[in-house]
Amino acid sequence: MPPTQNAPAIPPRSETAEPPPPSRRELNKAATRQAITDAALQLLRSKGPGNFTVEDIADAAAISRRTFFNYFSSTEAALASVTHGFLDNALAQFRLRPADEPILESARAALVQLADPMTVAPMAELYSLAQSNPQLNRSELEAWDHCTAEIIDAARERFARTTGEELDELYLRALAGSIISCGKAAMDVWFAERGADLSATSLARLRQLLIDAMGLLGSGFTPTANLSTDRH
Amino acid sequence: MPPTQNAPAIPPRSETAEPPPPSRRELNKAATRQAITDAALQLLRSKGPGNFTVEDIADAAAISRRTFFNYFSSTEAALASVTHGFLDNALAQFRLRPADEPILESARAALVQLADPMTVAPMAELYSLAQSNPQLNRSELEAWDHCTAEIIDAARERFARTTGEELDELYLRALAGSIISCGKAAMDVWFAERGADLSATSLARLRQLLIDAMGLLGSGFTPTANLSTDRH
DNA sequence: GTGCATTTTTACACTCTGTGCAAGTTTCTC
DNA sequence: GAGAAACTTGCACAGAGTGTAAAAATGCAC
């Protein structure tokens, strides 16, 4: 990545209320980071997992090998940034939910919100590729685990803010972990059913699976309730 | 590990109904494997995570570096074998439960069964050390994930055997994932409360946390039920 | 036991990962 | 524009992980 002048003109996002002037340094860094993940993803597609080196990525991104390691600690970390992006997005949605809403309902809403092609596409691709690669899969697991920790924090903070009391730690951690597990389960089933199909109907199915999974969790997995049994 | 003559006299286990004569080769391999994990654990204790190399382990286990890699693909893999042992044990307990029992109840019973010092001790030690080390932590996550997959298989197979029908995949995966997550949550809380205390009362607390976590799961995390609130 | 097939260990060579360091560039601030 | 701060790069080096072929250990038949 040659320095200056070629940073894509990213207009300042107006999501949060803070407009920190994106300096050229920040823009360059963001562009380099993006170039790295793009190159990594491209190589993953063309050569398959495990069949390319950090040097290959660096060359493709037009940076030095050393600079790669200034951004990511490994090939997997570079790829996992895609998943991290998705989950950070989910977290943000979660935090936007009304504070008096049950946690489970907030999670359901946040997840459903994300089942659109733009958001799901990169994540879906990586998810499917990770299935066949132990290294990648571990990074994915780590990303989900990190997200669990963040949900725990968010929920704890929200509860304390609204009630002034402290939520039982076991309840908190068990619930957050279960939510994430159910989200993963929904995605697993979706992939098993549809591969990486990103059509509207396929995404509708994913949405339904996410809702169903949260429903199962909310009803304590009562064996009788077989809910929406239409499989495909 | 020098060859022959020093393999500990492991009497043939009578767990399963197959008594395959443990040849010297098998005994040697088992002994070497054990020597490696022992050496690794020892070094982990004495030098701390990340402060020793594969060569150190190999030297301590009296084998060559290359032989180490014939047994494990990395330092973390060698250490994770402890966790794998624990979880394999849990799986075995799960499979021993009566086939008509609800899955959740089987899981609860299997987990509670394992809360004794002999079984928990190595696992507990590794668990606490993994908290502070990303590399180790990823291996731990992988071990739990592997266990989830095995629960899924076991439960699916059991259900098909007893009813002849197929269990809904989403139900299966969501439940298995949640069970594991709740188990982890219980262990997390236990560690946060008691460190690696392995006294009888501490283990009783762990047992109670496991039961509570499964209870939460079974009741759909109804926010009102605050169950056994005695914290310590 | 001897001889031979099979399995396991080992040394060696090699590629790739990941990091410290110091020198070179770019960007920021004044 | 000059100096400070941040970023990139090349270089060197320790360590991970793997293929290969030779040596050692074990199993098996006689």
Image (spheres, coloured by chain):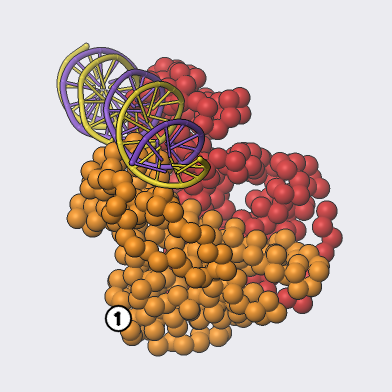
Chain colours: A red, B orange, C purple, D yellow
* Residue drawn at x 48%, y 45% as measured from the top left: A139
Which picture quadrant has residue A196? top right
**Location of residue D22 in the rendering, given as x and y in whole percent from the top left corner:** 34, 23
Which picture quadrant has residue A97? bottom right
**Location of residue B207 in the rendering, given as x and y in whole percent from the top left corner:** 44, 81
Q: Is residue B8 visible?
A: yes
Image quadrant in which the C terminus of chain B is located: bottom left
Residue at numbered disc 1: B199
* Residue drawn at x 23%, y 48% as measured from the top left: B60
* Residue drawn at x 39%, y 78% as measured from the top left: B116
**Location of residue D11 in the rendering, given as x and y in whole percent from the top left corner:** 24, 15
**Location of residue B146 in the rendering, given as x and y in whole percent from the top left corner:** 54, 56
Q: Is residue B33 visible?
A: no
Which picture quadrant has residue A126? top right
Q: Which chain does the residue under circle 1 lie in?
A: B
- Of the pair C22 and A133, the residue shown nearer to us: A133
Q: In this view, does D14 lie to the left or right of B84?
A: left
